[in-house]
Image: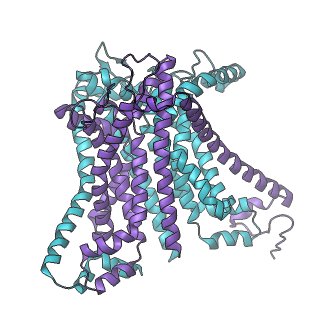
Amino acid sequence: MTTIDLRDGAPDLGEETRYSITRSRSGRQRQAINFLVHALFVIAFVSIVVPLALVIGYVVTRGMKVMSVSFLTDDIPIVTRAPGGGLGPAIVGTLLITGAAMLMAVPLGILGGIYLNEYGAKRRITKAIRFLAEVMTGVPSIVMGLFIYTTWVLAFGVSGFAGALALACLMLPVIIRSTEEMLRLVPIDQRQSAYALGGRRAGTIFRVVLPAAAPGIVSGVLLAVARAAGETAPLLFTILTVNAVNTDIFHGANTALSVQIFRNAQQVFPGPQERAWGAALTLLSIVFVFTLIARAVSAIFARKHQV
Amino acid sequence: MTLVDNEMRSGSVSLLAGESPPGRRTDSVFRSAAALAAGVVLLILGLILVTTTRNAWPAFAEEGLSFVTSSTWDVAGAAFGTLAFTYGTLVISAIALLIAVPVSIGVALFVTEMVPKRLRAGVVMLIDLLSSVPSVVFGLWGILVVAPAITGVYTNISSALSGVPVLRTVFSGAPISGRSFFTAGLILAIMITPIITSITRETFATVPRAQKDAAYALGATNWEMIRGSVLPFSRSGIVAGVLLGFGRAIGETIAVALVIGSSPQITQRLFSSGDALSAVIANQFGESTGTYQAALIGMGVLLFVITLVISAFARAMIARAERRIGAESV
C-alpha cells in the first residue's frame, strides 16, 4: 500500500507515524523549513559568541588603558573617587584567598571522589552523598557567604581565611564530582592487574588508579579554582576590604580583585571605573589562563585514552 | 564488564590481595579518611540550613508569615516583607529563561548536528570560555556599557508599543531605566546559556545512532530527524537543563546586584528598576544589624531552600534520563 517517494513529499506511513507532520508538505517546503531551522541554529550560536566577544573586547580595551606595572603593584587609593593608584592588595588577596581555599578543598575533594567511586559505588549512603554533592553545586554563592558569616565571622571576625572557607565550600562538590567522573574512566583491568600482583586497595588507588586519572583530576581542579577566583558574593562580608596589602590571611580584613570590581563599578567617577576595568582585565586573564590550561590538560588526557 | 566492575567496587575482590597486616591498616585508615571527606558534604549542607535559619530566626519570629507575603520593606520602620524581592527574582529568572532556553537548545543542536567533528572541540571551548567569565565582569559590563546604551532602545520599544493593548502594560510607561528587570534578565540569560547548553548537548549526544538512522531511512530531512528522534528522546534532559539554569538564575547575585537598579517595587513594567533577593543581600548586608541583618539572612534561607528544591528536581530528571538510556542500550 505505502509508496515511498523520497524526491517529492513524505512517505505515507499511516496514522501512528512520528513523521506524519511531513505528509501534507511538499518536498520543497520541507527543504525550506530544514534550511530555516538550521539558519536559526547558526543565529543561536552567533548570539552567544557576540556577547562573549563584546565582554572580552570591552574588558581588554578599557583595561589596557590603565594597565601598567605600577597598577598591578600599587596600593588602592584611600579616597575611592581619586584617579590612579593600583590594585596590588587585591591581586595579593585573590591569590592568597584562592590558594588557601584550594589547599582546603582539593585534598578533601579528591578523597571524597575516591570514596564515591572506589569504595562505595553501590551503597545507598554513597548514592545519597553523590546526590547531595550535585545539589551542593547549585547552592548560590551568596548563601555560602552567609553560611561562613554565621558560622565563622560572627565568632572569629573577618579575615582572608573566612573568604577562603566560603570559596572552599563552593569548590568542594565540584572537585568531588569531577574526580569521581575521572576515576570512573580508569579501566577496571588496571585495578585487577594490581590486585593480581598482591596490591592492596589503598596501594592500588595511590600507585595505579590515581596516576592514570591524574590529568583529568588536575583539569577538574583547575576549572574549580578558576571559577572560585572570580567569585565575589561569598567574599563581600567575609573579608570586607582594605587599601594596603595584607599578607596575613588569618587576621584582619582583606580584599580581592572581584570585590574591587564590584565596589568600583558602582562609582560614578572615572577614576574608580578605570580601576574596575583594569581589575576586570587582570581577573579575566587569571581565570582564562586556568581554564585554558585545564582544557589543554584534559584534551591531552582524552587523546591518550583514545589510543 | 560492568558486573565485574561492581564486584570490585563492593570489595569482594580484595580477598584476592595478600593478607599482610600493615597494609590492611593503611587500607582501613585511608578508607575512613575518604569516607569522612565525602561526609563533609552532608555536614556542610546540614550546617548551612541550621546556622542560617538560627541567625534569621529573629526576623522570622517578628514578621511571621508576612516575611514572605508582605511587600513592605522599611528598614527604619522595622518592617521586613520580602515579596517585592521574590517577585523581582522570579521576573528576571523568567526573562532569562525565555531568552536562554531556545538559544541554548539551538546552540546544542548546532554543536551536535551541524558542526563537523573536528571543529566541535573549538566550539565547545568557546562555550566554556563564556561560562568561565566571572559574574562580576558581566556585571561591570552590564552597568557601564549595556545599561547606558540600552536605555535608548527601551525608549524606542516603549513608544512603538504604546498603542498595543497587552504589550503596552509590560513594555511602556515611565520611568524607563537602563538598570531594570529586563537588563538583569538579559545579562542573566547570557550567564545561564552555557549550563543549559552543556546539559542539553550531553543529552542530544546520547540519542542512539539507530533512532537517527531510522528517521533518515524514512526520508526525513535533518530537521525532521531532530524533531522526530532527538527531541522526544531528550525531553527529560532538556527539562533538567532548564531547571538547572533556573536554579542558577535565582541564585546569581553580583551581576544582578549591579544592573537591576535596586528599587523594591512590584510592577509589570519590565523596563523599570527593581530588586531581587540575592541582590538585596549583596547590596545591603554591609550596613545591616539586628533584625535587619536577620531578615537579610532569612532571604538567604529562602534562596537556599528554593534552589535546593529546584536542583534536587533537576538531578532527579537527569537520573531518570540516564536510567532510560541505560535500559535502552541493554
B252 left or right, relative to B193:
left
B198 lies above or below A284: below
A21 left or right, relative to A174:
right
Can residue A87 be seen from the camera position used here? yes
A49 lies above or below B293: below
Where does residue B278 sit, x and y in percent of width and height? 40, 32
Q: In the image as oriented, which residue stretches furthest toward the left?
A: B21
Where does residue A17 sit, x and y in percent of width and height? 70, 67
Classify residue B81 by image quadrant.
top left
Q: Colour of chain A?
A: purple
**Residue for point 52% across, 18% down:** A270
B22 lies above or below A266: below
Q: Colour of chain B?
A: cyan
State the quadrant of the N terminus of chain B: bottom left
Given residues A10 and A55, the one toward you in this image is A55
**Residue for point 27% across, 47% down:** B45
| Callout count | 0
**Residue for point 74% across, 73% down:** B217
**Residue for point 27% across, 58% down:** B38
Q: In the image as oriented, which residue stretches furthest toward the top?
A: B76
